[in-house]
Amino acid sequence: MKIAIGNDHAAVELKWELAKYLEGKGHTVLNVGTDTPESMSYAVSGYKVARLVAAGEANAGVLICGTGVGISMAANKVHGIRACVCSEPVTAHLSKLHNNANIVAFGARIVGAETAKAIVDAFLNTQYEGGRHQTRVDMLAEIETTQDLTAAR
Ligand code: RB5
């Protein structure tokens, strides 16, 4: 798989560790995050990864900032992105299975490296279930494109 990975200054080391981990599993990693400890905005990396995933240039995205919150918020502003912040693997698994999440996010100040690897594995190794979930995922897209939701009227 081609996996886009992005981070801010709070997550440089965890990003490197995960990139090495993913490459060791045969994935191609597109690193668009910062590689220095100088302060930078999570919005930049969140946006870059989101654009790669939305354009189909990456099959999935991994985002890491201090908490995973800001960077996932930035990604979720891009059309077609469903980014989920996870601090454990069960949520990562269900975010793909039910919500067809295409980016997983977490916080370098929240989870350790082994939990981060388990989160990424759970996310990448799960297939979207579709079926009854598709109507709900379609509603997310409707809100995104129209700023309206027919079912809520
Ligand atoms: C940076 O200090 C921190 O605010 C950022 O990494 C992230 O946690 C924001 O959501």
Image (cartoon, rainbow, N blue to C red):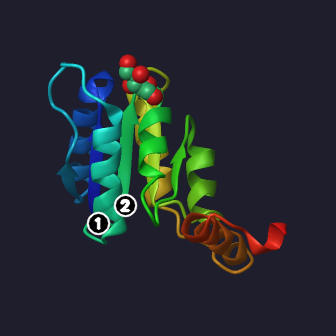
Residue designated by label 1: 1
State how far apart marks 1 and 2 are (Cα): 8 Å
Q: Residue at x 45, y 64 (%)?
A: 79
Residue 108 location, quadrant: top left
Q: Quadrant of the N terminus?
A: bottom left
Label placed on residue 32 = none
Q: Earlier in the sequence, mark 1 or mark 2?
A: 1
Question: Residue 105: horizontal and vertical position, in percent?
Answer: 45, 42
Residue designated by label 2: 60
Query: In which quadrant of this rendering is ligand 1 seen?
Result: top left
Task: Give 142 or 17, whichever is nearer the viewer.
Answer: 142
Callout 1: few (<14), some (14-19), or many (20+) C-alpha neighbours within 10 Å? some
Q: Residue at x 42, y 32 (%)?
A: 114
Q: Is residue 65 left or right of residue 94?
A: left
Q: Regarding mark 1 in the picture, which secondary structure is present there?
A: loop
Question: Residue 142: horizontal and vertical position, in percent?
Answer: 63, 72
Instruction: Judge whether residue 112 can be spotted in this image.
Output: no
In this rendering, is residue 71 above or below 110? below
Q: Hey, what amino acid is under mark 2?
A: Ala
Q: Hey, what amino acid is under mark 1?
A: Met
Q: Regarding mark 2 in the picture, which secondary structure is present there?
A: strand
Q: Residue at x 35, y 44 (%)?
A: 46
